[in-house]
């Protein structure tokens, strides 16, 4: 029998590095089906970076299999965070001892039944290219316009994409991007021949910022009733909130954004939490692993990106370009979308930024003929495999889901339940069935 030390010793001293380097950091089976660039301005070269994963187990012919598009928040954060940390088929994981970052298979990715497309939005974010900083959007209309070009370019990559129903999904600041592109599509389609239209079927927003003027007013009460601040702190926070609301009403977009930041910073300071994104976490989300992973040698090349690019999880340049957009509302876009497509709102329960109360506060103000009925609809208990998974409230085209045991990054905290949620919503199954009474998800 060979002495195992012969194998281990050299590794301890010298050769470990060469062993890890020879480990394929990006196994072949983890590669996206397609990735690269979608032009948004061919004249200048500005382009949106994408990764696309085909459905693993489609239940219909590919030309009918839904396509989900995912948009990260920020403003300025890359959808590769969603891909490699939340809902993609392969996610980063750090070896506690060697600190090596590898990809591990996600047991419940969102591309099980559907095609899944991640877009680094807008240009300037992640691997996307802003040839000229002036081309970076400063408002949601420009965001919609660029995304529309990118989505059209994507659809043109493969004839089967043309007929597939499209669902736009996203998180956080995606609460503004997702309605913006949905709204843009609905307004653009009537001017296009049917074969050229984007087949928008629905939008989904996770822990979204959609109507900031309403949402910024909810932090104090939410934290107070969660036992995180006392009455004196609540009063102080309410003063800061009122200032943010006042500045927003005056359309002082720059100052109102700063005022909102002060609210969140004060809440962070008062509570001393590891992160406002999830008050139940002892350590913040480790999205920096994605940044470390993507900047390792050789990874960019396999994704179709120039090795000279430096990947940042969030772009400050883009964040600054959209600074005056932050407090502007996308609520009117959701009101239009709910009349013309399905709308899913979902929130992880532990989020203190754009959580359950924050979302409900603007939803109940929606100008939509179904809103009374929606607010009257029963909030159903949602179980998965006999365990409480959350709550679902639905009427007509609007669904709202609370995901238990999750914070701001729902698929990172509850991968399986988030997968079941999105699958059932797209396919009108389970609690998303019309008049569904009781449903226990079956696997
Ligand atoms: C926004 O306000 C900050 C702080 O008052 C200021 O430094 C900055 O120049 C302003 N930006 C714009 C675009 O007005
Ligand atoms: C909150 O801010 C105060 C004053 O700046 C500081 O002394 C204190 O350490 C902060 N608390 C936390 C939990 O960060
Ligand atoms: C990569 O980027 C560098 C620096 O911008 C450029 O010189 C080079 O031509 C690019 N390589 C490719 C293959 O496009
Ligand atoms: C719901 O959306 C569909 C399109 O998916 C639309 O035809 C219908 O009118 C909408 N329903 C309501 C009540 O707005």
Image (cartoon, rainbow, N blue to C red):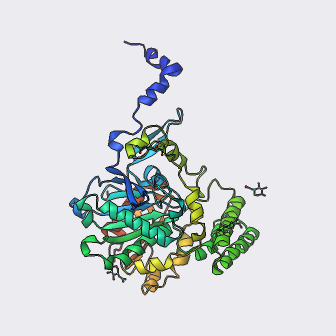
Instruction: State whether residue 335 is above or below residue 294.
Output: below
Quadrant of res 440: bottom left
At 60% from the left and 62% from the top, the residue drawn is 320
Between residue 171 and residue 435, name the one nearer to us.
171
Residue at the far left: name it: 61
Could you tell me residue 266's position as x and y percent? 71, 63
Could you tell me residue 187's position as x and y percent? 38, 78
Quadrant of res 358: bottom right
At 55% from the left and 54% from the top, the residue drawn is 314
Between residue 6 and residue 40, name the one nearer to us.
40
At 53% from the left and 19% from the top, the residue drawn is 13
Residue 371 visible, this orientation: yes
Total residue callouts: 0
Residue 345 visible, this orientation: no
Quarter of the figure with the N terminus: top left
Does residue 198 appear left or right of residue 60 in this picture?
right
Instruction: State whether residue 294 is above or below residue 73.
Output: above
Residue at the far front: name it: 43
Quarter of the figure with the C terminus: bottom left
Quadrant of res 195: bottom left
Judged from the image, the quadrant occupied by ligand 1 is: bottom right
Does residue 78 appear left or right of residue 217 in this picture?
left
Does residue 41 appear left or right of residue 96 in this picture?
left
Residue at the far bottom: name it: 369
Instruction: State whether residue 161 is above or below residue 438.
Output: above
Between residue 352 and residue 228, name the one nearer to us.
352
Could you tell me residue 26's position as x and y percent? 39, 40
Could you tell me residue 146's position as x and y percent? 43, 66
């Amino acid at each position: 029998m060979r002495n195992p030390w012969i194998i281990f010793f050299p590794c301890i001293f010298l050769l470990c590095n060469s062993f890890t380097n020879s480990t394929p950091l990006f196994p072949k089976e983890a590669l996206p089906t397609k990735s690269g660039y979608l032009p948004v301005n061919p004249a200048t070269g500005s382009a949106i970076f994408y990764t696309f994963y085909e459905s693993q187990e489609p239940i219909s012919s590919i030309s009918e299999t839904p396509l989900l598009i995912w948009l990260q928040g920020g403003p300025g954060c890359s959808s590769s965070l969603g891909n490699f940390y939340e809902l993609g088929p392969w996610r980063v994981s750090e070896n506690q001892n060697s600190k090596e970052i590898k990809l591990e298979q996600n047991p419940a990715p969102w591309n099980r039944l559907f095609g899944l497309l991640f877009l680094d939005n807008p240009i300037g974010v992640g691997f996307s290219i802003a040839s000229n900083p002036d081309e970076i959007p400063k408002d949601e209309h420009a965001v919609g316009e660029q995304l529309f070009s990118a989505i059209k370019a994507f659809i043109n990559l493969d004839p089967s994409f043309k007929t597939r129903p499209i669902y736009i999904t996203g998180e956080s600041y995606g609460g503004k991007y997702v309605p913006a592109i949905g709204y843009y599509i609905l307004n653009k389609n009537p001017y296009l021949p049917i074969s050229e239209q984007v087949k928008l079927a629905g939008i989904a927003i996770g822990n979204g910022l959609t109507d900031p003027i309403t949402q910024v007013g909810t932090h104090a009460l939410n934290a107070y009733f969660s036992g995180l601040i006392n009455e004196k702190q609540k009063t102080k926070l309410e003063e800061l909130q009122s200032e943010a609301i006042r500045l927003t009403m005056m359309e002082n977009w720059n100052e109102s954004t700063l005022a909102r930041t002060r609210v969140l910073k004060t809440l962070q300071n008062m509570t001393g939490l590891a992160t406002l994104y999830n008050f139940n976490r002892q350590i913040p989300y480790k999205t920096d692993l994605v940044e470390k992973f993507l900047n390792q040698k050789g990874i960019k090349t396999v994704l179709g990106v120039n090795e000279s690019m430096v990947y940042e999880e969030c772009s400050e340049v883009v964040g600054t370009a959209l600074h005056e957009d932050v407090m502007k509302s996308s609520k009117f876009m959701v009101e239009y979308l709910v009349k013309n497509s399905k709308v899913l709102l979902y929130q992880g329960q532990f989020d203190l930024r754009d959580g359950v109360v924050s979302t409900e506060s603007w939803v109940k103000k929606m100008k939509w003929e179904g809103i009374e009925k929606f607010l009257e609809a029963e909030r159903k208990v949602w179980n998965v495999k006999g365990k409480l998974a959350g709550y679902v409230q639905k009427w007509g085209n609007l669904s709202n889901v609370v995901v238990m045991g999750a914070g701001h990054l729902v698929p990172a905290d509850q991968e399986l339940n988030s997968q079941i949620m999105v699958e059932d919503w797209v396919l009108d199954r389970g609690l998303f069935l019309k008049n569904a009474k009781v449903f226990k998800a079956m696997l």
